[in-house]
Image (cartoon, helix red, strand yellow):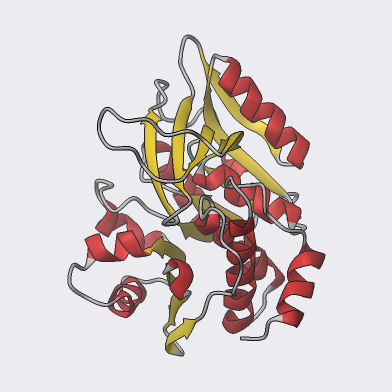
Amino acid sequence: MTNSIDIVGIGICTVDHLLKIPRMPNSGGNAYAEEYLHQAGGLVASALVAAQRLGARTKVIARLGEDEDGEYIRDDLNREGVNTSGLRVEAGSKTHISIVLVESEINERSFVARWATGSPIAPPEFTEQDITSAKILFIDNVTEGTNQAVEWARSAGMTVVMDPSPSAEGLREFLPMVDVPIVPEVFAQKWMPNHPPEDTAKSLVDLGAKIAVVTLGEQGAVVCTPEDGISKYSAYPVDVVDTTGAGDAYHGAFMVGLIEEWDVPKIARFASAVGSLNCRHLGGRTGLPTRDEVEAFIAKHSL
């Protein structure tokens, strides 16, 4: 069977309200926004948008609320070219929304969220064909739906990529089914407290990962493979405006490299460049680059 999709992702879609403020006010105080942005977001959805802009064919499977926010997300993904045939609406439910306060003086962010009220998406709302028509499955949590999707993906010989929540129930038993875990530093700190990120990457490989990545923000990323052990990759220098979505961009770019069957160093440098470029603007998707932009940027900044 020929794959019609490169990457299928299952995860939460959000609407983000981003406000850039000088500094967080004290309790009872005021802060005035220097900039405001209303944008669709969510880890899986934004990673798929990043991959789509880089030339991959992507599809999202997710629950939307029966509200204007859900329609906004669908319209935005359609504009980006992401296949939205896997989006499902639950009657009377509300979409996940986040308020992101970006403190410009210290380059830090704070979040306030209203969780989605719909149930997690699961079969029969998507089918085995929805999963196995792709080359890569990307997920962000352990649910009944992602468990079934991973089973189908592994039977079909697909690559499973995951950025897991460290608090997910059954995660240690689930991770051996993940080929490429790409986790942030906060995961590493919770997974193996008082250990360097290299230890987390190695522990993920010990659990069965073919490539394990710990992203470290401006410090770059640690990558571990069974063949080559630990390698460290630096971040690229950019004028940082907002780090929202940098990890999502990294995920999308890394999966593009997997599809292209590049070697691990090339994939890691490419993903690092995309994550860095996305920090140039307010919002998780505003700075997502095209393939030509990334290649020109890497040519100018060798690491």
Q: Nearer the viewer, residue 4 or 252?
A: 252
The answer to whether one can see residue 76 in this image is: yes
* Residue pictured at 35% horizontal, 65% vertical: 185
Image position, residue 58 (x, y; %):
69, 48
Whether residue 128 sits left or right of residue 213 in the image: it is: right
Location of residue 212 by image quarter: bottom left
Whether residue 293 sits left or right of residue 72 in the image: it is: right
Q: Looking at this view, name the residue that lies furthest to the top.
A: 92
Residue 108 vertical placement versus 260 (above, below): above
Whether residue 38 sits left or right of residue 160 in the image: it is: right
Q: Quadrant of the N terminus?
A: bottom right
Image position, residue 221 (x, y; %):
46, 74
Q: Looking at this view, name the residue that lies furthest to the right.
A: 292
* Residue pictured at 38% horizontal, 27% vertical: 115
Q: Nearer the viewer, residue 29 or 203?
A: 29
Residue 292 vertical placement versus 202 (above, below): above
Q: Quadrant of the C terminus?
A: bottom right
Residue 179 vertical placement versus 78 (above, below): below
Residue 165 vertical placement versus 188 (above, below): above
Whether residue 50 sits left or right of residue 81 in the image: it is: left
Q: Nearer the viewer, residue 33 or 116?
A: 33
Location of residue 6 by image quarter: bottom right
* Residue pictured at 25% horizontal, 64% vertical: 189
Location of residue 131 by image quarter: top right
Image position, residue 60 (x, y; %):
61, 40
The answer to whether one can see residue 1 in this image is: no
Image position, residue 61 (x, y; %):
57, 36
